[in-house]
Image (cartoon, grey):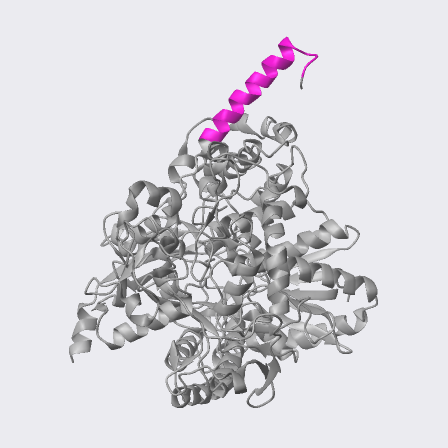
Amino acid sequence: MSIPVHDVLIVGGGGAGLRAAIAIAQASPDQSVAVVSKVYPMRSHTVSAEGGAAGVIKSDDSKEHHCNDTIGGGDWLADQDAVEMFVEEAPKELIQLEHWGCPWNREPDGSVAVRPFGGMKIKRTWFASDKTGFHMLHTLFQTSQQFDPVTRYDEHFAFDLLVHDGRCQGVATIDQRSGEMRIIGARAVILCTGGGGRIFPFTTNAAIKSGDGMALAYRAGVALKDMEFVQYHPTGLPGTGILITEAARGEGGILLNRHGRRYLQDHDLGTPLDVSDPRHPQLKSMELGPRDRLSQAFYWEREAGNVFEDEMGSYVHLDVRHLGEEKINKRIPFVRDTAKNYVGVDCAFEPIPVRPVVHYMMGGVDTDINAATSLPGLYAAGECACVSINGANRLGSNSLTELLVFGKRAGLEASRFARENPQIAIEAIAARANDEAARLKSLHTQGKAGEESIAPLRRELTSAMEEGAGIYRTQAKMDALCERIRELKARVKNLRVTDTSRTFNTQLVNALELDFMIDAAEALAFSAAARKESRGAHQRLDFRARDDDNYLAHSIAHRTDGDPKISYKDVTITRWPPKERVYGK
Amino acid sequence: MASSATALAAKTITLEVFRYLPDTESEPRYDTFEVPYKPDWVVLDAINWIKDEVDGSLSYRWSCRMGVCGSCGMMVNGEPKLTCAAFLRDYYPNKIRVEPLAHFPVTRDLVINMDDFMGKMEKLKTWMVPKEPRTIEQGEYRQSPRQLAEYKQYTMCINCMICYSACPVYGLDSSFIGPAALALGRRYSLDSRDGGADERAEIIQSDQGVWKCTFVGECSRVCPKNVDPAGAIQEGKIEGTVDMMKSLLMPWGRK
């Protein structure tokens, strides 16, 4: 069987994947690059990011500040060498995007404008109104189209990594249009598949975010790192979970409980200034505190009966009325449209109902500072990876920049690896085709024999995750979650795929995705149950304090035939020793 | 008891859904589904409900469910729409007919084949061709808010294909470059940083370019992101005419 072979194969065509592809095409035009994506690249979830991308460019800012904010924001779980490298590269990458045409907002003098975001001492978020991810993704996609060495496998679902002789040498995919299985060989593979927010019921994440790359790596024996750290964004729309960007608060929006009180002042986040005060909004204070702390404040407000409760569920108010229609239209037009469409609220005249919503996974495939995993030939970048620059809580607007910095780095490293290791075992890889085909066929032809249906099983998983691994956690609830996952892991093997046709069989893809989701959930649940402290986004009612003596360490989850094996790995601390996280002072 | 009474009283809405598997079926059919009616549901929610609860073989594309990824365009009662932004309440109590976007080959059910558009983007060079290349060390290009406003609306295209589905010219002749691709070409040609307008003009002014447009304006009317492809196309025609006049009057000058 003849199979296509590429120097570097990238799984995922979002921001990180496309940045990697362009980096290789520019630096090594003789190498062939494949982008395998289960959707057309411009549909990738990067498109939904709104607020902006952080990078130091203004004279009042400094790289020291960006490092400080990121490391403190991550509750000292970020690797500080990686953060420093990231902060150094960040502005270069944002300028590169500018050169490729990204329509960044501008100051009157034509320089790039920045806005404040949560947890930042100085404002440093580059933005393209409130559709920054959309503009970045389309800029990258359009830029990528000019490079001939880039071959796209659009709407190909990667369902297995082909590991031979201790090295990743390709992937097995389904071409969704034809339903054919396609084995693709590669001298190096980069996972850029994004996170897995869909393992939770209430999330800002798009339908495609099922943790595919995390599960692919995990199954290939690569560890997942810091999986227990899940970011709740404080302002999602009730019902749908659609995101209202942090930029709404960056521009001056305030959070109110049902008594009309700016309740964040009661949760150690500072003292409010009147919205008419020219010093409002204050950086790193109140509404511009970090996401984990704001979401936790909501939890306590709800416990105290201070939030709205009605048919929409529990929520508080995000009020931007005082910004005025003109500023709203200019700086956060998408917020106005979205709130109008999905909750029927015109934010120029009424407050927007919001509540915390699962938004981002700080954890992911364990990589080093060069995006390399422990498996030779396998790299990872973007949300699916954990370097870690985000530690226990990511700062808003670091993730879009992370895609660029680590996407490029992964591309160049994988390219180098491919050049230094040109020989791959094509025949051995091609021979895997039969096994892989048989595996797929077993799913296909299960027909009505399987007992489990996709949607109910997925609902069971997501509600168990919310119950056991929400904003606040306890040992009992996490242990119960682990037990549920053991059960679901067995049951997912008995999924019923009633659609037996080959062409665009989305049910088959959904079944494979659900299987991936359960793997990501497993690593998350067991890592969470093992960490007996509260840090960043991992908050426990039974261990309220951070415990640096025992847990200033990355969680490492390895897959086994039974429960995952959880171990720990040192955090790299260079110049910023752990201290208390302080906001609003 | 109370819950079954509620269930009985629960409102439903009828969806007629286009089904077609070209490999094995000689012609399409419509399947009818009774879907729970919720005023805050969009057509996409109803389709997801069908897939999850009734017929897992229904095929369609969707992802962000917030009107930005561009995946879920379909014909809703004959109008091309993003189904994540088409509310059931705007149709209830009437039934809703859902079909794949018009003017494209059907891959299966509500999934269309959009290879044609992807090819056209590349042909049109919808990327930055720098007027004056800059290194990273030289920093960003200066671009005033006014210069940004010149092209900004054309950057808002989400490639959802809804304009192609509404374009009668494209419906008759798919060699027409079409509204979204022409608007994207215009987006770069209007950007103060770009110098590729002449290269793009070869395609824009070609037989498949702006001159095929009969200015029906449907593309701009249906665009869910308020992009004005029809405007881009008319500007392209004016520019083409000016260039042609220049080359007639000043043959020694710029092509």
Residue drawn at point x = 47 percent, y = 78 percent: A448
Q: Residue at x 75, y 78 (%)?
A: A166
Query: Foreground residue, A147 or A451?
Result: A147
Residue B68 falls inside the magenta stretch: no
Tell me where residue A476 appears, x and y as whole percent: 39, 90
**Viewer-proximal residue, A31 or A366?**
A366
Q: Is residue B34 toward the left or the right of residue B80 in the image?
A: left
Q: Quadrant of the image for the N terminus of chain A?
A: bottom right
Q: Position of residue A266 (x, y in %)?
A: 28, 70
Residue A273 makes an appearance in the image: yes
Queried whether the magenta region covers residue B252, the answer comes back as yes
**Looking at the rendering, in which quadrant would you find the C terminus of chain A?**
bottom left
Q: Main secondary structure of the magenta part?
A: helix
Q: Tell me which residue sits at (19%, 76%) in the image.
A: B4
Q: Residue at x 31, y 64 (%)?
A: A239
- Quadrant of res B127: top right
Camera-side residue: A110 or A246?
A110
* Residue with the most extreme top position: B249
Q: Which residues are magenta?
A: B231-253
Q: Is residue A427 above or below residue A482?
A: above
- On screen, B249 above or below A463? above
Instruction: Locate residue A160, reporting x and y percent.
Output: 64, 72
Quadrant hosting residue A33? bottom right
